[in-house]
Image: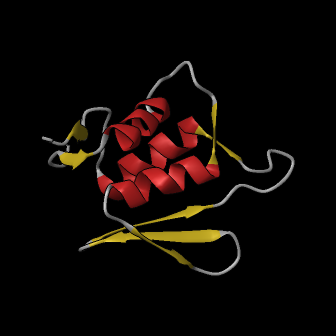
Amino acid sequence: MSSHIEVDQKTLDIYQLVWDYRIELIKWNLFQKMMVGAGFAVFGSGGSAVSFKRGKQTAVIHKPHEPKGNQIYTRFLRDQLRKHLDWDADTFVLEDE
């Protein structure tokens, strides 16, 4: 597991949705907000590929196509976050206020 990343409450709430196995789909824009909230810059990588970069960490995740439209499977996101960033359900923590 990677070290903890301190985030605000809204970002943590989205992250917890991604790791909630009862949730099947979330909106792509929520996922992007979560990544930005964790300090990642977002870049188009051509086609549906979107790069998320923070320091030396990079994850390239493909934006969903129709018919799901603007939603993406949380299982896919979990797999990608584990693979590219070595994250798990406990990576994000609430920042001190």
Query: In the displayed image of the protein, which residue is found farthest to the right?
Result: 67
The residue under the point 49% across, 54% down is 33
Q: Is 53 placed above or below 46 here?
A: above
Q: Is residue 3 left or right of residue 15?
A: left
Q: How is the image coloured?
A: secondary structure
The residue under the point 56% across, 37% down is 74
Q: Is residue 18 left or right of residue 73?
A: left
Query: In the displayed image of the protein, which residue is found farthest to the front?
Result: 97
Residue 22: quarter of image: top right
Task: Report how many numbered discs are placed on residues in the image.
Answer: 0
Residue 8: quarter of image: top left
* In the foreground, 82 or 71: 71
Whole-percent x and y of residue 24?
63, 28
The residue under the point 50% across, 22% down is 21
Pick the quarter of the image with the C terminus. top left
Whole-percent x and y of residue 17?
48, 31
The residue under the point 38% across, 44% down is 11
Whole-percent x and y of residue 28?
63, 51
Whole-percent x and y of residue 32?
52, 57
Residue 85: quarter of image: bottom left
Pick the quarter of the image with the N terminus. top left
Q: Is residue 19 left or right of residue 25?
A: left
Query: In the displayed image of the protein, which residue is found farthest to the top?
Result: 22
Q: Is residue 51 left or right of residue 3?
A: right
Q: Is 5 placed above or below 21 here?
A: below
